[in-house]
């Protein structure tokens, strides 16, 4: 099933019709006949979306939306409310994610649900590990920033004039080219309001697609303004990534209050999505990072070693794997205490990271052991890098925390190095074999007196 939807309507035929329409689209649909029943069922099934009709016997859509929002588990639950007249603004004030018109066609409704489902699942249509996207831009007054793009500058200026005192964000008016140029820079808007037709029919939707395809602007909220005669474009706009579609008369005095609330709602959803995404990224970093040294941990390093081995095999490059172990580290903890041991690990990690060439992988592999992986690094170069690392570690004593027996402590490391080359006529680079060879070389370095480098035999390493 694509997701759980709760349909709430007091009219049996409406419930049945909606359930058939949504079930045929492979959604898991549950129905409720009243607001009270909807609250009870929602607590049990935790739906992804709630659709509220206009015929509830015990409360209106705004009241049900407020009651759902009051539940801790439903604070961010998308609620679609069918409303008309002044009830539309009341539903938006109560936190409705979108409004449904009684005349909405099936394609538009399903497109709107697909858009909300994308938001509900955290935008998983974008790769998660990127983590390098720029933060959304802000105007000088520190408010969120919106960009309006219309068929004529005068139209966009009219939208801004009608809305600027009703919204809590700064508004700029741009040509499409200017909006795209900004999207390629660090100054990205939080919200875009775009006319579906600008110079040519549908070019506003092409602008929407461009913004959605670019790393810096793809998380922005986008709303499309549609002329009445182009109503068939609404599901297309929603499927392309528009968060909402507004009528062309959005700036009329009778429409401006609702327009302002719908734009603010899109901005709020965008900021909530940002919060969730950043929290996920932070958790991923924590899961892959050693908290003491700030280096990658074993959980990250092993898969990355496999990726680098496959990359060097494809490019016919050399791969060097080093295991580095602090000499007699147990004595540091036993004699000087664990705070001293932590200080030594953190300082040595920093020295190793500063000495390794760009593009190398460095991880705390466990305890006092570090892993370094260097792509495009043949054996002779690997030996030089290992020697640089050994010298960097012993170059100066490590300062110990206050209260330790000594103020500083000299530290050395032993290094085991294994290298392999990717080539069509050779066996594929085996990351596990390289790691095992480096480990055996490290044991030999320890046995030979410590503070030295041992290179694994090339024939054994790959």
Image (cartoon, rainbow, N blue to C red):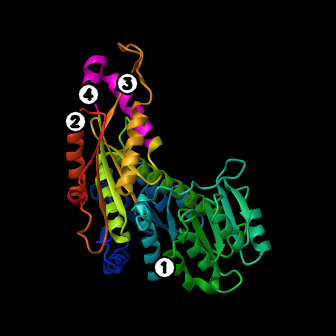
Q: Disc 4 on helix, strand or loop?
A: loop
425 up-or-down from 347: above or below: below
- Disc with the residue nearer the chain's start (4 vs 3): 4
On residue 328, the disc is 4
Residue at image mark 1? 108
**Tag 1, which secondary structure?**
helix
Which marked residue is nearer to the observer: mark 3 or mark 1? 3
Side of 293 relative to 258 (left or right): left
Q: Is residue 73 visible?
A: no
* Alpha carbons under labels 4 and 3: distance apart: 11 Å
Quadrant of residue 398 within the rendered picture:
top left
Magenta: main secondary structure equals: helix
Picture coordinates of residue 459, whole percent (x, y): 22, 60
Q: CA distance from mark 4 to mark 1?
A: 69 Å
Of badges 1 and 2, nearer the viewer stands 2
Nearer the observer: mark 4 or 1; the answer is 4
Mark 4 in CB contact with mark 3 (< 8 angstroms): no
User: For mark 3, what is the residue?
Assistant: 410
Of label 4 and label 1, which has the lower sequence position? Answer: 1
- Local crowd at mark 1 within 10 Å, few (<14), some, or many (≥20)? many
The numbered mark, 2 or 3, whose residue comes first in the sequence reads: 3
Judging by the rendered image, the residue that carries numbered circle 2 is 448
């Amino acid at each position: 099933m694509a997701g759980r939807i709760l349909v709430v309507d007091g009219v049996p035929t409406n419930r049945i019709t909606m359930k058939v329409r949504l079930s045929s689209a492979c959604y898991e649909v549950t129905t409720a006949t009243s607001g009270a029943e909807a609250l009870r069922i929602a607590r049990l099934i935790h739906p992804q979306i709630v659709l509220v009709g206009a015929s509830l016997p015990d409360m209106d859509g705004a009241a049900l939306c407020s009651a759902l929002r009051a539940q801790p588990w439903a604070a961010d639950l998308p609620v679609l409310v069918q409303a008309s007249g002044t009830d539309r603004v009341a539903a938006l004030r109560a936190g409705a994610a979108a409004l449904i018109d009684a005349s909405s066609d099936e394609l538009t409704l399903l497109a709107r649900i697909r858009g909300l489902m994308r938001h509900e699942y955290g935008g998983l249509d974008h790769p998660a590990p990127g983590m390098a996207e720029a933060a959304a831009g802000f105007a000088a007054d520190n408010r969120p920033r919106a960009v309006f793009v219309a068929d004529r500058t005068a139209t966009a200026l009219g939208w801004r004039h009608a809305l600027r005192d009703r919204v809590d964000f700064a508004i700029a008016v741009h040509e499409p080219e200017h909006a795209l140029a900004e999207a390629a820079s660090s100054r990205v808007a939080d919200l875009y309001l775009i006319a579906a037709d600008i110079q040519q029919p549908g070019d506003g939707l092409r602008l929407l697609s461009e913004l959605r395809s670019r790393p810096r602007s793809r998380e922005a909220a986008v709303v499309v303004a549609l002329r009445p005669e182009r109503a068939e474009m609404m599901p297309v706009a929603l499927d392309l990534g528009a968060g909402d579609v507004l009528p062309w008369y959005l700036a009329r005095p009778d429409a401006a209050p609702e327009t302002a609330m719908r734009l603010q709602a899109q901005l709020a959803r965008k900021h909530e999505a940002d919060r969730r995404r950043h929290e996920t990224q932070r958790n991923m970093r924590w899961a892959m990072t050693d908290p003491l040294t700030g280096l990658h941990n074993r959980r990250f390093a092993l898969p990355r070693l496999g990726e680098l081995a496959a990359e060097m095999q494809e490019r016919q490059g050399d791969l060097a794997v080093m295991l580095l172990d602090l000499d007699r580290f147990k004595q540091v903890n036993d004699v000087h205490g664990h705070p001293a041991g932590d200080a030594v690990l953190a300082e040595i990690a920093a020295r190793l990271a500063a000495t390794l060439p760009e593009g190398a992988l460095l991880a705390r592999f466990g305890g006092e052991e570090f892993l370094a992986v260097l792509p495009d690094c043949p054996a002779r170069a690997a030996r030089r890098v290992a020697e640089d690392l050994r010298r960097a570690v012993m170059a100066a004593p490590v300062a110990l925390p206050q209260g330790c027996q000594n103020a500083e402590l000299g530290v050395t490391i032993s290094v085991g190095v294994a290298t392999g080359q990717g080539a069509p006529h050779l066996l594929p680079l085996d990351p596990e074999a390289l790691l095992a060879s480096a480990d055996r070389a490290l044991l030999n370095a320890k046995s030979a007196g410590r503070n030295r480098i041992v290179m694994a035999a090339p024939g054994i390493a790959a």
